[in-house]
Amino acid sequence: MDLYPKNKISVASVKRFIVIFYIIGLIGFLIPETKHIFILITPLALLLSVYLLAIYHKPYTQNTVLLFLLIYFLGYFIEVAGVKTSLIFGSYEYGKAMGVKVLETPLIIGINWLYLTYISVSIMNSFKTKPWVTILSAPLLMLIYDIVLEQVAPKMDMWNWQSSSVPIKNYFAWYIIGVVFVALFKLFKIEPNNPIAKVLFVSQFLFFFMLSFLLN
C-alpha cells in the first residue's frame, strides 16, 4: 500500500514521528487542562498507529484480509462476552476513552486485539524464531503490555474493574487468547515483519509505563 507517508518520507523519519507523537501524548495527559481532550482522542491515536502499520505491511492477500477480519470479530465478541458475563476477564466496564460502544463494548477493541497480535508477531518474526516459539512468546509480549496498561487504564477512563485489583484470571485470559490469535497467524501463513512494529510497541509501552507512575 503506497499511502502517505510510505515512499514519501523515510522510515527513520516515521519512527521519529511516532516517538514525538507519544511524548506529546504523555505531556497532554499530565496537564490537567488538556487531559480530557487527550482522553477523547485516545481511539484516534490507536487508529493512527494501526494505519501506519497497515501501510508498511506486505504483501496483502485474501488470507491477510480474512485473518484480520477474523481476529477483529473474535476479539470484539470475546470482549462482549467478557463484559456481559464477567467469566472471561472478571467484572469490568468500559469508559469513554475507547470511543463508540455497542453492547457496552467499544467497537475499536477488536482493532486493539488485532493490533497487539500483529505487532507482537512482527517483533518475534524479526528475530526469526521458530513458529512454536512465536506462538508461545508473542503472547508474552501482549501480556507484559497488558500488565502495564492495567495500571493506568482506569486513570485514562479506558475501563474500570469492579474489584480494587485486577483479577488474576484477566492475565490468564489475555495469554490464552493471545496464543490462539498468534496461532491463527501461523495457520493462515501470515508472517508480518513490519519495520515500525518495534518502535510502536516500545513507544506505547513506555507511554503507559510513565503514565502509571505520573498520572493522577
Image (spheres, helix red, strand yellow):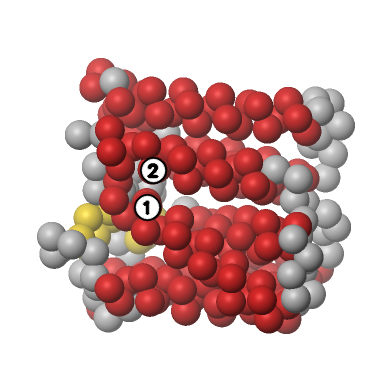
Name the residue rendered at 32%, 71% in the picture.
170
Q: Which residue is located at x 44 percent, y 28 percent?
A: 25
Q: Position of residue 112 (x, y in %)?
A: 50, 56
Q: Amino acid at mark 1?
A: Val
Depth order, front residue of 60/31: 31
The answer to which of 205 and 157 lies nearer the viewer is 205
Find residue 56 and report its image quarter: top right
* Mark 1 residue element: helix
What residue is pinned by disc 1?
Answer: 148
Compared with 14, 103 (above or below) is below
Which amino acid type is marked by label 2?
Phe
Query: Can residue 153 be seen from the camera position used here?
Result: yes
Q: Is residue 63 left or right of residue 89?
A: right
> Could you tell me residue 79's position as x and y percent?
38, 69
> Where on the picture, by quarter, is residue 207?
top left
- Looking at marks 1 and 2 on the same chain, the residue that comes earlier in the sequence is marked by 1
Name the quadrant containing residue 123: bottom right
Number of marks present in the image shown: 2
Q: Are marks 1 and 2 in contact (CB under 8 Å)?
A: yes
- At x 66%, y 72%, the residue is 134
Callout 1 crowding tier (Cα within 10 Å): few <14, some 14–19, many ≥20: some
User: Is residue 154 found left or right of 58 in the rendered image?
Assistant: left
* Label 2 element class: helix
Q: Residues within 10 Å of mark 2 (few under 14, many from 20)?
A: some
| Residue 173 circle label | none
Residue name at image x 51 percent, y 67 percent: 140
Residue occupied by mark 2: 209
Return the x and y of residue 138 as percentages of the image width and height: 59, 67
In depth, the one of 40 and 149 nearer the eye is: 149
